Amino acid sequence: MLTSQRKQLILDALKRDGQVIAKNLSAGFSVSEDTIRRDLRELAAEGHLQRVHGGALPSSPAAVDLAGRESIESASKAAVGKAAAQMVEPGQIVIVDGGTTAVQLVRHLPPDLRATIVTHSPTIAVELARHTGLEVIMIGGRLFRHSMVNVGAAAIEALSHIRADLYFMGVTGVHPEAGLSTGDLEEAYVKRALVARAAETVVLASAEKLNAASAFMIAEVTAAHTIIVERETPCTLTAPLEALGVTIVRA
């Protein structure tokens, strides 16, 4: 069997089963585990999967650059953002992450809402600039252009002084075993700090993020109290999350 054929079969199995185990692939293809690990390394380098101990998981297409993310299923992101906006109550202190789905969230906030929005995303802050009923607190730091959010020690230090009612988290991967993940280490640290500063964490998860993983884990999936998904999201993707005690809201 040609290497290209074997790689395609690996990707087919990954799509079908949601994960692949190197030992099982080795036996199935009658090749060494070293050969399979090389295949997985090359597929990971091409962005087709995310390697984990013993095998691989689907790689999130949400880890592409900002322009690419803006082109992914904008209608579904709008629905998720609208459902999230409806969770915000007057008088609350709410942390809003960066990302294209979070932009949809703030665009759907009622024009007469009075609340406090904390964000480390310049994009989110600009979206809220004309929303005069909202107090906007901007968290500074080093700008991570890929996600248009501020990261680093300065951001984490500023967050330590905030206690919020809700944190709306953006991620690139949601997986029952691999947890909540993103593609940058510093961004993962900031998101973890945001979880610690909020009474409740709500994850915004359009379809391409489910059952996918990125390189850096933020937290176990149970750090999310609620995950908002698209209405048509297959139950096969959400049932493992619900089994862990996470509330699923369909937008």
Image: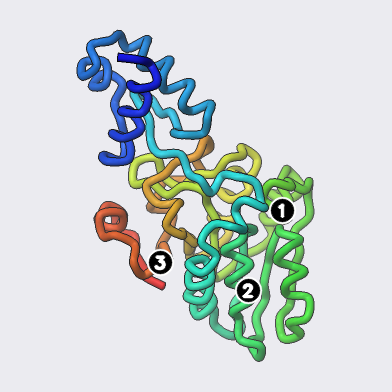
Coordinates of residue 130 in the picture (x, y in percent): 78, 81
Residue placed most toward the observer, 65 or 204 = 65
Q: How far apart are marks 2 and 1 (CA)?
A: 15 Å
Whether residue 215 sits left or right of residue 127 in the image: it is: left
- Residue 80 visible, this angle: yes
User: In the rendering, which numbered label is found on residue 131?
Assistant: none
Asked if labels 1 and 2 touch by Cβ distance under 8 angstroms, the answer is no
What amino acid does circle 3 point to?
Glu
Q: Which quadrant of the figure has residue 248?
A: bottom left
Whether residue 6 sits left or right of residue 160 in the image: it is: left
Element marked by disc 1: loop
Residue corresponding to mark 3: 230
Residue placed most toward the observer, 150 or 212 = 212
Element marked by disc 3: loop
Residue placed most toward the observer, 24 or 12 = 12
Look at the picture and state if 196 lies above or below 9.
Answer: below
Q: Residues within 10 Å of mark 3 (few under 14, many from 20)?
A: many
Coordinates of residue 126 in the picture (x, y in percent): 77, 69
Residue corresponding to mark 2: 106
Coordinates of residue 93 in the picture (x, y in percent): 62, 73
**Which quarter of the rendered picture does the N terminus lie within?**
top left
What amino acid does circle 2 point to?
Val
Residue corresponding to mark 1: 148
N-terminal label among 2 and 3: 2
Coordinates of residue 206 in the picture (x, y in percent): 46, 60
The residue at the point 73 percent across, 63 percent down is 123
Whether residue 83 sits left or right of residue 147 in the image: it is: left
The residue at the point 61 percent across, 39 percent down is 184
Look at the picture and state if 73 lies above or below 30.
Answer: below
N-terminal label among 3 and 1: 1
What amino acid does circle 1 point to?
Met
